[in-house]
């Protein structure tokens, strides 16, 4: 055999062995990544240092018996979970901050857990019989200090499946001042002072005894959207605004004409996003063109080699 | 109602399966050709089996490559609608997945073009057979890497992570070149392609039919007896 042909064949064999060796692992699912919440107890947001990182496909909703409560007053919070990965073990926790710190345990904020779904007084409860749908109730007493408080829910699938998910905005409570004279607006996302890019999710909670006439979202004083019914969530396309500091305002007007609002400051920074996107598109287009072009070039080279062999009288 | 995410999962399985079959088919033919070429040093039964097997798997590889390529395009289409657009353009892992999907599509297009243009006679020409096989290997390898990124999206990690670490590639960061460099790469490639077309025209290369008689008889192609 001609030496070039032999080299080509050896190259094919070596590459084939490498690929065939790698093929099962290429197509396989990954193994264990992290551990998860273990046993019923009070656990901070990171499940005591053993949190799951991969996203769950479960849907989580939170419901509260009331969102305006007197200091120390009783209320119930129900976390409904549906779907998600098919594993029997499901852990659910309620936290006051979505950050892996001890202060994320609601009792640090002043909440009193009278009863969790298991009849204890923990913020984390785990069931081993999850079959695609679960509803868990916490009976609480509100903090004794007046103010705004938020509770979030987090779920974890167990049994080595390792998925986690959070409720998006949680439930916001107004403790004290229950005889409010107008709507109280709480912008729960984005955080004030945060830097945002791309499409920004704006979420607001409105607390009022009366129903809403309308709720307006404004950026730098210019109305962007107007809603009459909740949920008061918006998707804000930030790329159409200049980079820099902007004021985001959510104003609520109830049927009695009472007005409430919250204004926060955010910084829009899309320059990096735009240039990164441009580089990515260029890379994809150029890479694809290059591959196809070089396939064409190599085809011609292969035909040239064949021609040379023929003209050289090779057998 | 069937969601785009479900259709994406379906088409992803479809192209994954077909392209694996195409890769296996092409690889088997390559190994069979080597076996037949070295028949003087191989057991007769093995040579006979290789001739039989390559006859079946050659066509299988071609058909599976076409089906896989269609699946790949459908998978890319359904994937574009399976997630919100802001997620698609903001998530570096998804960006990398789209990037590698484009590259693997280009490799498999090359495979299908070569086989369609030259027929099974390509296996009688070592250079063309090598190019065909290497393209299939590269295409399958990139599809595998794309699958690894899919595992990152759905599972948070992949068993191929040591491979990425070895290459010092952080999959959570967008793989990209500076636009000027990318443009230069594309330009050089296109110029090389145009020059190669001119050469092919000058020597009338694209009129060539590949076969044992025109390829220096490195590889013969004895059709198997289909029983």
Image (cartoon, coloured by chain):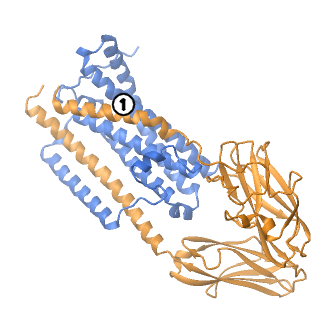
Chain colours: A orange, B blue
Residue A213 horizontal/vertical position (percent): 80, 81
Q: Residue at x 87, y 83 (%)?
A: A180
Q: Does residue B34 appear to the left or right of A70 in the view shown? A: left
Image spot of residue A304 (x, y percent): 16, 40
Q: Is residue B145 above or below residue A311?
A: below
**Nearer to us in this view, A10 or B112:** A10
For the C terminus of chain B, the image quarter is top left
In the rendered image, is residue A24 in sight?
yes
Give the class, few, some or many, for how many residues have Cα within 10 Å of label 1's Cα (few <14, many ≥20): many
* Residue closest to the far top: B44
Q: How many marks?
A: 1
Q: What residue appears at the point 16 percent right and 30 percent down from the top-left corner?
A: A3
Q: Residue visible at 52% across and 40% down?
A: B14
Horizontal arrangement in the rendering, residue B204 relative to residue A108 (left or right): left
Name the residue carrying label 1.
Answer: B27
Chain containing the residue with disc 1: B
Q: Give the quadrant of residue A124.
A: bottom right
């Amino acid at each position: 055999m001609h030496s070039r042909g032999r080299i080509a064949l050896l190259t094919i064999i070596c590459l084939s062995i490498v690929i065939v060796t790698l093929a099962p692992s290429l197509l396989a699912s990954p193994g264990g990544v992290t551990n998860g919440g273990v046993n019923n107890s009070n656990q901070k947001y990171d499940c005591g240092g053993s949190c799951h990182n991969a996203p769950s496909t479960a849907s989580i909703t939170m419901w509260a018996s009331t969102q305006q409560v007197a200091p120390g007053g009783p209320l119930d919070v129900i976390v409904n979970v549906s779907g998600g990965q098919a594993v029997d073990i499901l852990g659910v926790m309620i936290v006051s901050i979505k950050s892996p710190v001890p202060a994320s345990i609601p009792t640090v904020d002043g909440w009193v857990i009278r009863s969790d779904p298991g009849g204890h007084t923990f913020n984390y409860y785990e069931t081993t019989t999850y079959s695609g749908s679960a509803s868990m109730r916490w009976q609480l007493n509100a903090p004794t200090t007046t103010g705004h408080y938020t509770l979030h829910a987090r779920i974890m699938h167990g049994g080595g499946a390792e998925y986690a998910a959070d409720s998006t905005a949680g439930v916001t409570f107004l403790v004290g001042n229950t005889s409010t004279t107008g709507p109280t607006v709480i912008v729960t996302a984005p955080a004030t002072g945060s830097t945002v890019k791309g499409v920004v999710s704006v979420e607001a909670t409105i607390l009022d005894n009366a129903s809403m006439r309308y709720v307006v979202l404004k950026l730098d004083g210019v109305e962007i959207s107007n809603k009459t019914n909740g949920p008061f969530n918006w998707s804000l396309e930030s790329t159409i605004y200049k980079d820099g500091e902007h004021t985001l305002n959510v104003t609520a007007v109830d049927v009695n004409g009472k007005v409430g609002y919250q204004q926060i400051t955010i910084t829009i920074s899309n320059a990096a996003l735009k240039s990164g996107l441009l580089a990515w598109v260029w890379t994809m287009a150029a890479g694809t063109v290059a591959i196809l072009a070089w396939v064409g070039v190599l085809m011609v080279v292969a035909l040239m080699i064949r021609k040379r062999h023929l003209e050289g009288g090779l057998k | 109602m069937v969601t785009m995410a479900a259709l994406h999962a379906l088409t992803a399985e479809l192209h994954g399966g077909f392209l694996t079959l195409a890769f296996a088919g092409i690889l088997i033919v390559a190994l069979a050709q080597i076996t037949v070429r070295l028949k003087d040093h191989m057991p007769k039964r093995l040579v006979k089996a290789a001739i039989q097997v390559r006859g079946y798997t050659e066509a299988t590889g071609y058909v599976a490559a076409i089906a896989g390529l269609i699946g790949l395009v459908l998978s890319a289409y359904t994937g574009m609608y399976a997630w919100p657009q802001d997620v698609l353009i903001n998530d570096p892992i998804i960006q990398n997945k789209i990037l590698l999907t484009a590259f693997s599509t280009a490799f498999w297009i090359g495979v299908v073009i070569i086989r369609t243009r030259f027929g099974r006679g390509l296996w009688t020409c070592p250079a063309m057979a090598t190019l065909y096989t290497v393209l299939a290997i590269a295409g399958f390898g990139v599809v595998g890497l794309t699958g690894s990124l899919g595992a990152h999206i759905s599972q948070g990690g992949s068993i191929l992570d040591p491979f990425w670490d070895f290459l010092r590639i952080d999959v959570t960061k967008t793989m990209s070149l500076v636009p000027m460099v990318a443009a230069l790469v594309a330009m050089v490639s296109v110029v090389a392609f145009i020059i190669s077309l001119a050469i092919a025209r000058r020597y009338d290369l694209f009129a060539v039919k590949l076969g044992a008689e025109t390829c220096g008889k490195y590889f013969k192609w004895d059709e198997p007896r289909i029983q």
